[in-house]
Amino acid sequence: MLRQIEGSRAVAETVACCRPEVVCAYPISPQTHIIEAVGAMVKSGALSPCEFINVESEFAAMSVSIGASAAGARAYTATASQGLLFMMEAVYNASGLGLPIVMTLANRTIGGPINIWNDHSDAMSVRDTGWIQLFAETNQEAVDLHVQAFVIAERLSLPVMVCMDGFILTHAIEGIDVPEQDAVDAFLPPFEPRQVLDPDDPVSIGAMVGPEAFEEVRYLAYVRQLEALDLIPAVAADFARGFGRSSGGLVRSYRTEDADTVVVALGSVLGTIKDAVDARRDAGERVGVVGITTFRPFPVQAVANALAGAQRVVVVEKAFSVGFGGVLSTDVALATQRSESSLYTVVAGLGGRPITRRHLETMLAAAGEDQLEVLTFLDLDTGVVEREQARMAAATTRPGPTAEFVLRDLALRQNGEVEP
Amino acid sequence: MTTQPVRFFQVGSFAVGNRLLPSGDRTVQSDADRTNSLDAGHRACQGCGEALGARYAIDAAMRATAGRLLVVNATGCLEVFSTPYPQTSWRIAWLHSLFGNAPAVATGMAAAMKVKGKTDVRVVGQAGDGGTVDIGFGCLSGMFERNDDVLFICYDNEAYMNTGVQRSGATPPAARTATTEAVGSQPGNVFGQGKDLPRLAMAHDIPYVATATVADLHDLEGKVERAMQIRGARYLHILVPCPLGWGSASSDTIRVARLAQETGLFPVFEAEGGQVTAVSPIRHRTPVEEYLSLQGRYAHLFGEHPSLDVIARIQAIADHNIARYGLDPGEHDDAGPEGGRP
């Protein structure tokens, strides 16, 4: 049943239907509404039995989750941005120990300069941690992916991170079909851990592993991640049968048949890109979109298949590797290395900058005419950049912090105190 | 019936006295059926105080919980020397996660037991002094203030031994470590720094805080047992000499630990709800030189030109502890080994 509900609230209600037994809370925007709502459900008794623990840091949040999961409890937490980095050591540890924790990542950029708004810098920073990373395009998909995430995590004994765009999804109120308890119970069996701390059958978990075995242990973790490439589509198909709607999977194509130019992206920006594609299609251009739902493990073959007919592949990504370029595009490059297509990277939406249909259409038009640079920063204000570069070059001593001068430059122009 | 408490003074330990006690009063360690939680075959150095302390404490916790125990271990010597497969020495359910998160992992384990209704299964977290007073302190303080049902044990050997004897927040003044070398005008660790973790634990008003040394087995085991009778956050700080890091003889581990207490440098006490409830009085008050001179980490204080001023400052710390906790034997004329205990 569709309800008008905030994305965070819908995710919280869905997580509650998944019957987590230990939930850790540490506030950081933009995930805080999720954990607040779960906390209220535990306090009211609506979610029981469940231990809701207010911890002192994200490092503790992931560590408590590790302890709970190793002791056989279904564990859930949520974070974003700096919080994810603060728990980083434990993020690696959770996957290294093979603990099926589910975590929501309400995507937000990483400072400095400090900025609370959306991009994918946080998710990209953990791509090599050994977590499965799923990206939601819509709030409906965010909700559905959480149900699937617990199934995937517990079948593989690997942690799963559901990435949803901060504010754009978490704070959007829209019609969402929040799964019913009965349906979730039928889909998600009780947690049966593969390894557990049990006084009746004591084992050592987390022992030291030296050079004689470390590579093999890590290789087996790699193989287990690859198993997810078969399991994720199977779980998505089961979900479609059980819930009557399609969510999840590895990749999803939109109007790519006969497309010369195909855009690749992650998350909620896919909606805007589809609108831009529709508009360009109406204008007679052959363009399409491939959305990547499963970012880790990276579905190389599925992406290669989805991009097989394209002459141009344009990766629009909300993150970049400073000093290099795209992050997602390097993965896409691996998938397209045997094709003749040209690969373009468009960095967009950093720190919450809106990605508009107009910007995307302009970019697609340039791509269609082979006028797109290999690496483009969408909607970059080159005037501001050039003025700051000139100021830095002219300064003889201590030019000061760049971010402050860029802000001052923009404010002065906005106020009309300087001729634009 | 009037009873006379049995008191043993002959060697300053219970090693002989244990045999004379009724079997029910003997130590867990003297019991042939003890768990042997940390079994033989591990890779600790000869004379390792931490290996002793951990076996004493965990065996006692196993008895107190009838074997219903989960343990999480921080990274450090204890974790490294005890675990490499297939030689894991732990005969208990044991988890190692990271260096700085053992208290939080313990919280998660306790939460799991609570949510599953297995309240008979208890949780112990354990770490060295680095994992407790430094890198793990944020998580430890959080576990304390939430009053989670965890006993956290610090095996304090007063430096980062696993990485090669570097200074920690528990390293005492004047001690030589690899990062406080015995050079310059003030050789060794500086005065006026460091954390007194038992007192910080008490400041959280948690139900139980205690200190112990590996020199007094009865006392140590009794404190573990007492801790396991209580629900909520509990803290046990055990002094465990490290022959390698302290430069003491492997055969002197117990002697050095006893002297730490007998000099007043390491006060042994219990506290409940933030208030000291019992102390182990000093039986043979000993000048700090006797303790310091057994250890290579203080060698720069002795020799041809002893640093009498530095030794005097260390003695002043001991005297301050004795006054603060009332450890002077003169204040306890009935001072048997357990004279100050309730």
Image: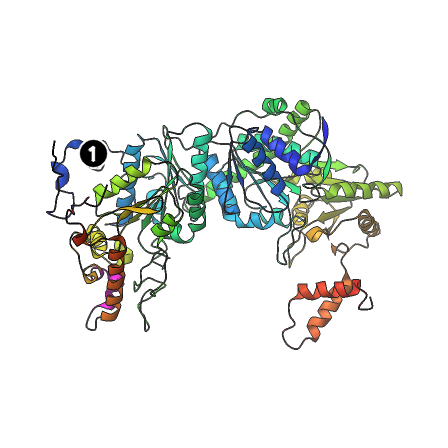
Which percent across, then down, holds residue A88?
53, 48
Residue occupying image coordinates x 12% and y 47%: B9
Q: Quadrant of the C terminus of chain B?
A: top left
Q: Secondary structure at mark 1?
A: loop
Where residue B126 sits, quadrant-wise, is top left
Looking at the rendered structure, the number of numbered marks drawn on it comes to: 1
Where residue A323 sits, quadrant-wise, is bottom right
Which percent across, then down, holds residue B312?
24, 67
Of all chains, the one bearing label 1 is: B
Query: What amino acid type is highlighted by mark number 1?
Result: Asp
Residue found at the far left of this picture: B10
In this rendering, would A324 be left or right of B193? right
Position of A389 relative to A219 (above/below): below
Q: Nearer the viewer, residue A315 or A175?
A: A175
In this rendering, would B57 be left or right of B5? right
Q: Which residues are magenta?
A: B292-307
Mark 1: few/some/many CA within 10 Å (<14, 14-19, 20+)? few
Give the residue pinned by disc 1.
B31
Can residue B37 be seen?
Answer: no
Whether the magenta-drawn stretch holds residue B303 is answered as: yes
Which percent across, then down, holds residue B107?
44, 39
Q: Quadrant of the N terminus of chain B?
A: top left
Whether the magenta-drawn stretch holds residue A212 is answered as: no
Residue found at the far right of this picture: A283
Q: Nearer the viewer, residue A338 or A154?
A: A154
Can residue B24 be seen?
Answer: yes
In this rendering, would A174 be left or right of A110? right
Residue occupying image coordinates x 71% and y 40%: A172
Which percent across, then down, holds residue A368?
83, 49
Residue occupying image coordinates x 30% and y 34%: B62
